[in-house]
Image: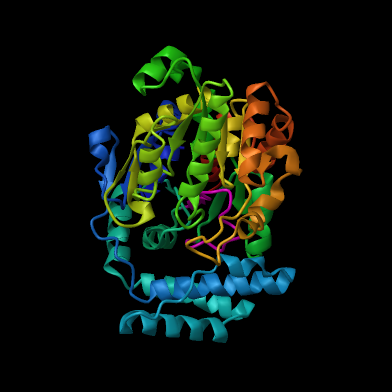
Amino acid sequence: MTNKKIFVLLPDGIGLKNFAFSDFYKLGIDAGFVIKYWNATPFDLKDLRFDEIKIQNSKSHPLTEVYKNARKHIELNRSITRTKDSVYDSYRFPFEYKGIKKALKSGFTRFLVVSHSTESGLQRIRNQIKNQERKTLYYHQSMETLQKEQPAFVFCTNQRPMAAIAPLLAAQDLGIPTATFIFSWDNIPKATMVVETDYYFVWSDHMKQELLLYYPYLKQEQIFITGTPQFESHFNQSKLLSRDAFFEQNRLDLDKKYICYSGDDVTTSPNDPKYLEDVAITIRELNKKGYLLGVIFRRCPVDFSSRFDKVLDDYQDVITAIVPLWEKVGKEWNTVFPAQADIDLQMNTIAHTEMVINLGSSMVFDYVAHHKSCAFINYNIPNALLPIWSVEKIYNYIHFRSMPNETAVFWIDKPESIAGIIENVIKGDQSSIKSAKQWFEIINQHPPEEASSRIWKSIITIIYKE
């Protein structure tokens, strides 16, 4: 294998956590690969000492968004027809009609959905996406870059962004093998596949089977089970601070034990501030009984809203906010940029807290990697801002059906349940750990600390095959 140049396509900043700040980069360099980040984000990776090729114009064709949205709705329709399960309707976003431009887009999208909701119709939509993107300046500039650089392989860090379509299409048209990584554990049933590549890297056999189910045109040999690098840091003890150092760094009380409340984004959990308040109220009551407890609040890294401000101000005696080290440079969730230091911050937050409370977050896996418990919020808030939202809707999502049994987490079915669950965990209740570990093994290939190594082995296999 003479050509060892690998392009890592970054259509958004979130992929940096998995493919720049994990073991992935070092392992590739140690194996003799030349890694270039093909960077479509507004972030300057040269400041981080990574070799990058900046994509100056990542503008998709105006019709691509319409076809992409139509494809999503058609795939969800196909899933409903195939499974007789209406849960797929919950993955839809409502059409927008405010303004002529949005109304026209929505109208055209709905027409495409109605007229193309067959297998052959879906194929025509997929082809139209490619046809439109081949007309763009972005596509032709991508061709020029690839012809100049001649990489052996193009690896995309996320299957969701439209910004990834043109460069991957250009690579395929030049005969350069391509692959994409499935970004999150819940992505496949939600019809978030925007790119089409030669190969797909997934977290687990469970995810592989999902991919084959929802995309029947894919073949077994196109899919590599690698795990995800996002959990690797939990097994690197060299980054672990002492309790004294972590508490001093974050102005925590050494006499207290802390519970972590891990926030969700506003779409997943619009009532998160109230849930956080319920936990804070509980901690106050427990402290009156003689406990010395506090709450560390780690917000969702892509949530820069002010919606928690009042709760944080009202409960300063029990809540300490440790803000994720992410930077926001745009309005969308995919224009946030993780700092490498945040990986260590998250790991140490987990290591120095007793358990985590959240609403259906994958943090359950981060915590069980440290042999610690998770409790899921499982009650609705009266007079909520969004009356159509409910916890029942959240936990009915497909990805929660992978849970081996309900004992993988503690269930907080009402605010009054919080105290008992916290007390039991503080006293040593580990009854959820065994099932949580089983769930983790279903969701992510084990050993989890070898994900980056498996990714490189898969890349080598592909390059030799090609």
Q: Residue at x 36, y 17 (%)?
A: 248
Q: Pinpoint residue 32: horizontal percent, then vertical percent.
A: 41, 29
Residue 190 within the magenta-colored segment of the rendering: yes
Q: Residue at x 36, y 32 (%)?
A: 340
Q: Nearer the viewer, residue 217 or 241?
A: 241
Looking at the image, residue 57 sits to the left or right of residue 396; the answer is left
Residue 4 visible: no
Residue 392 within the magenta-colored segment of the rendering: no
Q: Nearer the viewer, residue 302 or 189?
A: 302
Q: Pinpoint residue 9: horizontal percent, then vertical percent.
A: 38, 49
Q: Nearer the viewer, residue 327 or 461?
A: 327
The residue positioned farthest toward the front in the image shown: 288
Q: Residue 458's quadrant in the figure?
A: top right
Looking at the image, residue 242 sits to the left or right of residue 79; the answer is left
Q: Which residues are magenta?
A: 177-195
Q: Is residue 447 above or below residue 466?
A: above
Q: Pinpoint residue 264: horizontal percent, then vertical percent.
A: 48, 48
Q: Residue at x 28, y 58 (%)?
A: 144
Q: Nearer the viewer, residue 114 or 90?
A: 90
Instruction: Give the total of numbered labels.
Output: 0
Q: Is residue 280 above or below residue 173?
A: above
Q: Residue at x 38, y 83 (%)?
A: 103
